[in-house]
Amino acid sequence: MKTFSKEERICGKITIDELVAKGKSFNSFPFRIVWLEVKESTVAVKVVISVPKRIFKRAVDRNRLKRLTREGYRMNKEILSESLKSKKVNVLFVYTAKTILEGNEMQEKMVEALTLLAKKTLH
């Protein structure tokens, strides 16, 4: 079942700050992905999605991009969770493109990003 529950989301300033400060990052257009392996977590992957106000001034646009990104992650998250084995990871997706991608395009880009992340977390 393809869900994106509350347990799979990162909801805390301290956790997000630690992820940004100590995490490893790479770019996979249109995302900058920051990830950090954690020891204690209830689920294998916890995610937070960010769309910068500097690029998209209107909240409507930011909310649409976050919704599209969440949907792309929800539909394809098994790519990452299957490759992790027993590791637990926190992930930050920062949308960096200057334009709004449509649904199908966002899905394809998310698959690329999750595949790359799966490869990087194995090493």
Image (spheres, rainbow, N blue to C red):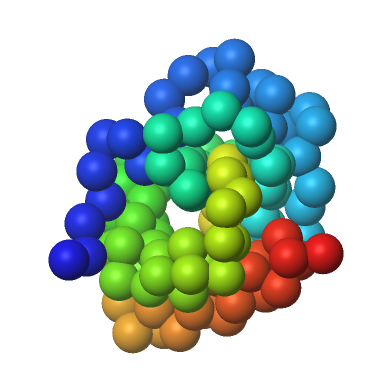
Q: Is residue 9 above or below residue 30?
A: above
Query: Residue 22, how many percent across, how many down?
Result: 80, 32
Q: Is residue 70 above or below residue 5?
A: below
Quadrant occupied by the N terminus: bottom left
> In the picture, residue 32 is in which quadrant?
bottom right
Instruction: State the residue lying farthest toward the front.
Output: 86
> In the picture, residue 2 is in which quadrant?
bottom left
Instruction: State the residue lying farthest toward the left.
Output: 1
Please give the name of the residue rendered at 58% of the width and 22% of the height, measured from the top-left corner. Answer: 15
Query: Residue 45, how many percent across, how many down?
Result: 48, 48
Query: Residue 91, how many percent across, how many down?
Result: 58, 47
- Of residues 120 and 26, the one nearer the viewer is 120
Q: How many marks?
A: 0
Q: Is residue 120 visible?
A: yes
Q: Is residue 101 visible?
A: no
- Of residues 60 and 86, the one nearer the viewer is 86
Please give the name of the residue rendered at 72% of the width and 60% of the height, measured from the top-left corner. Answer: 121
Relative horizontal placement of residue 37, taking residue 3 as reference (left or right): right
Please give the name of the residue rendered at 42% of the width and 42% of the height, measured from the top-left corner. Answer: 43
> In the picture, residue 75 is in which quadrant?
bottom left
Please give the name of the residue rendered at 24% of the width and 43% of the height, measured from the top-left corner. Answer: 5
Relative horizontal placement of residue 40, taking residue 1 as reference (left or right): right
